[in-house]
Amino acid sequence: MSRPSSKTRKRKSNRKGESASKTKNVVGISSLHIDKENTRVVVFTEDVLLNQLRRDGPKIEKSFDSLCEGELAQLSSLVSRTASLLYSGLAIAKQNNDEIREACAMLLINGSSSFAAAVAVLRMGYVLQPGIILRSLLEALSTSLHLLQNPGDLAAYEKHKLPSTKTIAAAKRALPPFGQLYGHFSENFVHIGRFHKTINPVREYSKGNEALELNLSSLRIAAWLLYVTTELAFNELLQKPSYWQSVDQGYMYNPSEAEKEWMTEYFGLDLA
């Protein structure tokens, strides 16, 4: 029996390679939805998540960066001030075997990571989820404020027996704006509200996006609360704290006049 020529064998090999390449690029269909009202068929392929992350994600992030460059710079500046205090404070707390401030530092450092995660999720186009992440940050803040006022509750905290309702009450006592800002956050994101009752498409951002603006306001709140709580925990590292005044039994929230002006501009509210 005669053998095929080398030219014939090469041609067969190429056809096989082309077939394999085409098979590799085929995207499977996950399901179909027949929309009778609009007379159309909606096809769901198996790469929906991959497309969201790799195809659409960079476009959404670019639109966010373009619209929110000023906001990002402002938030980053405040987060940087916080990080400097936190890591220096943690090192000193460990040297001094200061269990309360060490616990607070770890809570607040993890809270800082939650803040960064919330920004990243919003940047990816998700407008409902950042608020859910920030909820854990607010609990870290309230717990820290509680422990700083009630060091005897450290054992309960370590045994996971310190209720959040108790810590939030303590946070409101120590930091009066906490209640107003916490209420704003809870009303819009934590409890089931209008953004939970409608579909929030993951798409490129444009000017006038109400959900984006509301998220940015919540991020401003969270970043500010994180800094002010950190300043209370490690105020001895600052020559002149911006928010806390030394009194007989500790410290009292009393922002400077310059800080009050900055807060009014930062929040668009008078929170002094």
Image: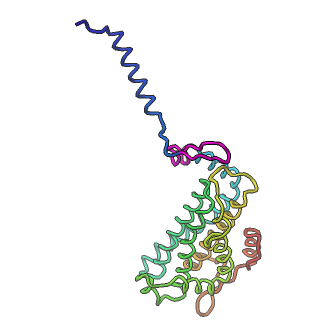
Q: Residue furthest front?
A: 36
Question: x%, y% of residue 145?
Answer: 56, 82
> Which residue is at a point 73% across and 68% down the rendered structure image?
266
Colour approach in the figure: rainbow
Question: x%, y% of residue 197?
Answer: 65, 65
Q: Quadrant of residue 254?
A: bottom right
Q: Quadrant of residue 75?
A: bottom right
**The C terminus is located in which quarter?**
bottom right
The one of 80 and 88 positioned closer to us in this rendering: 80
In the depicted structure, whether residue 235 falls above or below residue 22: below
From which residue to which does the magenta span run?
32-55
The one of 214 and 91 positioned closer to us in this rendering: 214
> Which residue is at a point 63% across and 60% down the rendered structure image?
127
In the depicted structure, whether residue 128 falls above or below residue 124: below
Question: x%, y% of residue 114?
Answer: 53, 66
In the depicted structure, whether residue 1 falls above or below residue 198: above
**The N terminus is located in which quarter?**
top left
Q: Residue furthest bottom?
A: 248
In the rendered image, residue 33 lying in the magenta stretch gets the answer yes
In the depicted structure, whether residue 155 falls above or below residue 213: below
